[in-house]
Amino acid sequence: MTPVAIVEPVELVGAIVQRVALHNASNVERLGIGVGDEVLVSRRNDVIPCLEEVVVKHGDRAAAPSECVTCKAALLRRGEYLVCNNLDCRSIIEGRIQRWVGTQDILEWGDKRVAQLVEAKLVREPADLYGLKVDDIAKLERRGAVIAEKVLDNLRARLPLTLPVFLASLGIDDFALETAKLIVSAGYNTLEKVQAATADELERLKGMGASKARSVVSGLAQRAEEIQRLLAVGVVPVAPMAGGGLSGKSFCFTGSLPLPRKEYEDLVEKHGGTLLSGVTKELGYLVMADPSSASSKAEKARKYGTQCIDASAFMALVEAAAASAPAAPVPPADAPITLASAVLAAAQPPGPQPDPPRSRPHPNPPWPRLQRRPPRRRRLRALKTQPPAEPRSSRQVLHASPGIRGNGLAVSHRDTFGRLLLVVRGYSHGEGQEAAVSLNRDPDFPRHHGNLGSENGHRREASACWGKP
């Protein structure tokens, strides 16, 4: 359970703060906070609200709750936290389902949808998700079968799961994705090996402690039956590619990159590479926007002999890894088909498909042929002295040539109704003069002309739109 302090609304760094996380029971005891106290609240790094201290004490010290607010079961103290061990508690069931879909980053599976499924008693554990029907979600959400089918498609699109993702999605305490990757990379690359590992064996791994090793072993033992039910519904974990093109190479991604970081990390795992969260002596490649950057992380990487590369160089490594990847083995024709083999076969990319036959053109088509007409000149309309409201879409700078009496710049965008708008900005050189602006609307440089009004030599803005909504 995470304690939260409710404070009077206050504006901090441009945001209204009303709720402040207190993190754990030990922090509440350290602050000595109570109802009615005047407190000092900040936003660390201008993002996270934090309750720094109690300024004026007015109320009694808050007492820790003794029972779960959901199931009324007794709470237990585990380190700095108060936990509920009732596996039938609705909050715990919702948290486990949220952990399952959150670790896999499945779209359309928010907390609200999970809560509705649990409340309707359609889902109790992750294996129940794969038995849902379209009607179950359509009736629950009241949004129709199309959205319900999309929700289920997003769930099944993540299959098959790699072994680290499968283990981390189980929701075992102290068993996050990085810990699962550490165990699998140490040689426990099958589900049977991980389940057979002892706490003493896992404790010897670098980065694993005694308490974490015991938590992993006991958690897997408690979830043994649940794991079997997941295997029965077709959720069979697969080991990461062994001997892939990036095997033996480690990568760390930092800064802004052309693609989302998750896509780069998936490529590393797909080809057998290793992901690291920071710069260490074991890191082989640091992927960043500017390899010549003088940031502290880049300097530390160079000190350790790590290669600093950009996204294009990383993609070159991936292409080389894909070219050198061995072909998937073909099972014999008389091999028995098992559930695991069927899932693995479905996960293999399809082979080259023959090109579809090209249909011959209709000798006398009943529809008119579409021909590109030469661009027509249109007069700009709806000139205004104030610029239109900024749309929620991208902007594109068009070509603008110097006018007769001034210089102009045009920026185009599309508004929320799909109309193409034009904002003309320019300067004139005298009172009552006009600056003619020639705009380029086409790659073939057809011209579109318009006038920009001016007043007393000051900067003026005008707008125009064309095209149907």
Image (cartoon, grey):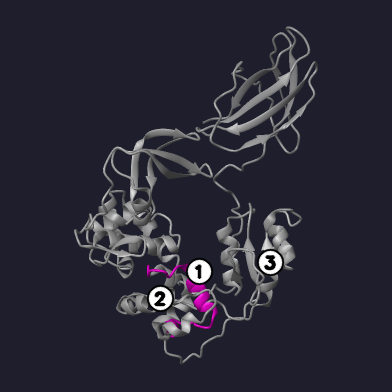
Front in this rendered view, residue 231 or 141: 231
Could you tell me which residue is drawn at 48 percent across and 73 percent down? 180
Magenta residue check for 259? no
Instruction: Indicate which disc, 2 or 1, sits on the residue closer to the N terminus.
Output: 1
Q: CA distance from mark 2 to mark 3?
A: 30 Å
Q: Which residues are magenta?
A: 171-194
> What amino acid is at disc 2?
Val
Residue for badge 2: 216
Instruction: Indicate which disc, 2 or 3, sits on the residue closer to the N terminus.
Output: 2
Could you tell me which residue is drawn at 71 percent across and 13 percent down? 458
Residue for badge 1: 178
Residue for badge 3: 285
- Is residue 288 among the parts visible in the rendering? no
For the N terminus, the quadrant is: bottom left
| Tally of marks | 3
Front in this rendered view, residue 128 or 19: 19
Query: Hey, which quadrant is residue 273 in on the image?
Result: bottom right
